[in-house]
Image (cartoon, grey):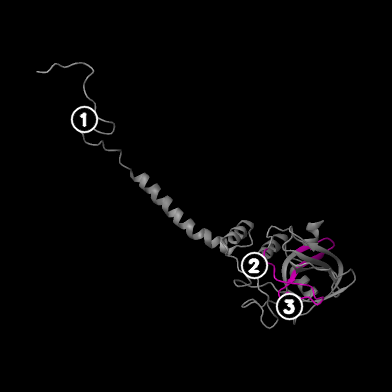
Amino acid sequence: MGEYIRGTRSRAPYGYSREGTPNAGPAAGPLAWLLIIVFLSAMAIFSWLFPAYVFRNPHIPFNYSLLQQLGKLEELKAFTATDPPAGSRGKFYTASELYNDESGRPDDQLAVLNDLQKRLYIQNYADGENRGYIMGDFEVVRTRLLGSDDFFPGLALEARSKQFPNVILEYLIPMDAAFENPYKPGDTLKLFKAGDLATILHLAHLTQDRLCVTAVSLTYVDRSDLPVAPPKALNVSAKWPVFAAAE
């Protein structure tokens, strides 16, 4: 019989029994499996909802930037009076009609409406109803250049409705090329139902019970022969109204 020597007994490698079989790890309980299933289900739902949310809301700065980086933004189109945005023809408003419809709307409702109009503009009005267009004669009060802090580069005109002075128009003219400003205070800006499609982008209450309407022509033409063109990119973080933001 061999002699037993203290401290020399062999030990099994880590993870194995003395008989040489692997040690069984603790079994995953029902709660662990439930958590795994919940996590995977949440990831699947997120992967489906998040892209839909991004594409549905391109007017949100993060979404717009992401879509821009992915090359998933559609170029803005130039329309004509005989070929307006499909399914979104909108109503043509005089200054007094628009004032009667919108001056009593609370600011929080205007904010929702404004977000919708910017989303539709970015999407070329492919998914929703355009609020409408403004028409009439407006007296130019002042002008300013639009730059990188604005919705797009170009020129902005602030004008007062000649028919209903409580309506102030901000008329935006998008341009990427160099230009000379042909407008000056006192000039008359005429917006026609037949040719301008001056779509409403933003509405805001002003002091003295006035309504500010920011609009841009979807035909991208100007009777002063300015090099107007659909914007190539937008700054969706821009402040509104345009002249108030500059001040």
Q: Is residue 91 above or below residue 46?
A: below
Sooner in the amino-acid sequence: mark 3 or mark 1: 1
Q: Position of residue 8 (x, y in %)?
A: 22, 19
Please say whether residue 210 is visible from this viewpoint.
Answer: yes
Residues drawn in magenta: 204-233
Residue pictured at 82% horizontal, 63% vertical: 144
Graded by Cα atoms within 10 Å as few (under 14), some (14 to 19) or many (20 or more), the crowding at tag 2 reads many
Q: Position of residue 118 (x, y in %)?
A: 67, 65
Q: CA distance from mark 3 to mark 1?
A: 89 Å
Residue visible at 77% across and 75% down in the picture: 97
How far, Cα to Cα, is label 3 from label 2? 20 Å
Residue 66 placement (x, y as % from top left) = 59, 58
Along the horizontal axis of the image, is 208 left or right of 45? right
Q: Nearer the viewer, residue 223 or 53?
A: 223
Tell me where residue 193 sits by quadrant: bottom right
Residue at 88% across, 73% down: 187
The residue singled out by tag 1 in the image is 18
Report the Cα–Cα distance between label 1 and label 2: 71 Å
- Quarter of image, res 213: bottom right
- Residue 178 drawn at (x, y percent): 78, 67
Q: Where does label 3 land, which residue? A: 92
At label 3, which amino acid type do we have?
Answer: Phe
Q: Is residue 150 left or right of residue 128?
A: right
Give the residue at mark 2: 122
Q: Main secondary structure of the magenta part?
A: loop
